[in-house]
Image (spheres, rainbow, N blue to C red):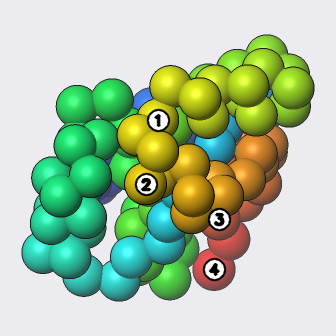
Amino acid sequence: PQARPFQTQWALDQNSGNYTLQISIISEPQLLRSFRNDYGIAANTQVYQRADQRYVVIFGSYASIEQARAAATQLPTDVQQMEPWAKSFASVQNDITSQ
């Protein structure tokens, strides 16, 4: 199988019943890098590539939607104001594999 960019394989490996926080969808690798660096979240966020080639910045893997929402407080205030939304890994995995 082809190597998948960023943490795409990590996202596929998560329990489909777990949740993550989706922060942003970005189309260009350069914009993605700038976004993560500008907000200081490059070290603690993950990125997966969707089937449509766009990149999605996510934060963590949590056993419940409540835990995922609570984790938003760990993000910088500027990022919290983007209102990251809790999303199941089942839907993340569908984003990656559906053509």
Residue on which the image places disc 2: 78
Tag shown at residue 75:
1
Q: Amino acid at mark 4?
A: Gln
The answer to the question of whether label 3 and label 2 lie on touching residues, with beta carbons closer than 8 A, is: no
Q: At label 2, which amino acid type do we have? A: Asp
Find residue 95 and name its label.
3
Residue position marked by numbered label 4 in the rendering: 99
Identity, as a three-letter code, of the amino acid under mark 1: Leu
From the viewer's perspective, is the residue at label 3 or at label 4 nearer?
Answer: 3
Labels 2, 1: front one: 2
Q: In this rendering, which labeled residue sits more in front, label 3 or label 2? A: 2
Q: Is residue 67 above or below residue 36?
A: above
Circle 3 packing at 10 Å, graded few (<14), some (14-19), many (20+), is some
The mark nearer the N terminus, 3 or 1, is 1
- Of circles 4 and 1, the one toward us is 1
Where disc 1 sits, the SS reads loop
Q: Position of residue 31 (x, y in %)?
A: 20, 76
Residue shown at the point (15%, 52%) measured from the top left: 37
Mark 2: few/some/many CA within 10 Å (<14, 14-19, 20+): few
Mark 1: few/some/many CA within 10 Å (<14, 14-19, 20+): some
Q: Is residue 22 visible?
A: no
Q: CA distance from mark 3 to mark 2?
A: 26 Å
Q: Amino acid at mark 3?
A: Asp
Q: Does residue 85 appear in this view? A: yes
Please identify the quadrant where the C terminus is shown.
bottom right
Q: At 57% from the left edge and 58% from the top edge, which residue is drawn?
A: 81
Query: Which residue shows up at 86% across the image and 31% down it?
Result: 65
User: Mark 3 or mark 1: which is in front?
Assistant: 1
Q: Nearer the viewer, residue 9 or 32?
A: 32
